[in-house]
Image (spheres, helix red, strand yellow):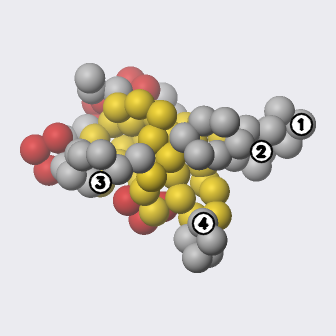
Amino acid sequence: MKGGVYLDAEVPGLVQQHFALVQVKRGKRKRFPENCVELVASAEAALARAQPVHNLHAAEVVGPSRSSEGFRLYYLLRWLSE
């Protein structure tokens, strides 16, 4: 299990690891709704477009996963700028 989401090797398209830009104030949150997450092609692309002063952070995430309320969520694996 990674970040609260089970990864199933037999269904690789269901939930995947991605590099992303996450529009949030960094804190202790480990999951984000999809409207705060923009997937990008690589870690380099995420780092190049990150703007921490505007709360836009480069990250590696896993998802999307449906919450019990029906929202699509991404779970933080790591911040790329640490």
Q: Are marks 1 and 4 in contact (CB under 8 Å)?
A: no
Mark 4 sits on what residue? 67
Q: Are marks 3 and 2 in contact (CB under 8 Å)?
A: no
Q: Which mark is residue 13?
A: 2
Cα separation, mark 2 vs mark 4, equals: 18 Å
Measured as percent of width and height from the top left, residue 4 is found at 59, 46
Q: Are marks 2 and 4 in contact (CB under 8 Å)?
A: no
Cα separation, mark 3 vs mark 2, equals: 24 Å
Picture quarter containing residue 66? bottom right
Q: Amino acid at mark 4?
A: Ser
Picture quarter containing residue 26? top left
Cα separation, mark 3 vs mark 4, equals: 19 Å
Helix, strand or loop at label 2? It is loop
Decide which of tag 3 and tag 4 comes sooner along the chain.
3
Which residue is drawn at the image coordinates 30% and 45% (left, top)?
28
Mark 1 sits on what residue? 10
- Quarter holding the C terminus is top left
Cα separation, mark 3 vs mark 1, equals: 31 Å
Which residue is drawn at the image coordinates 34% and 27% (left, top)?
80
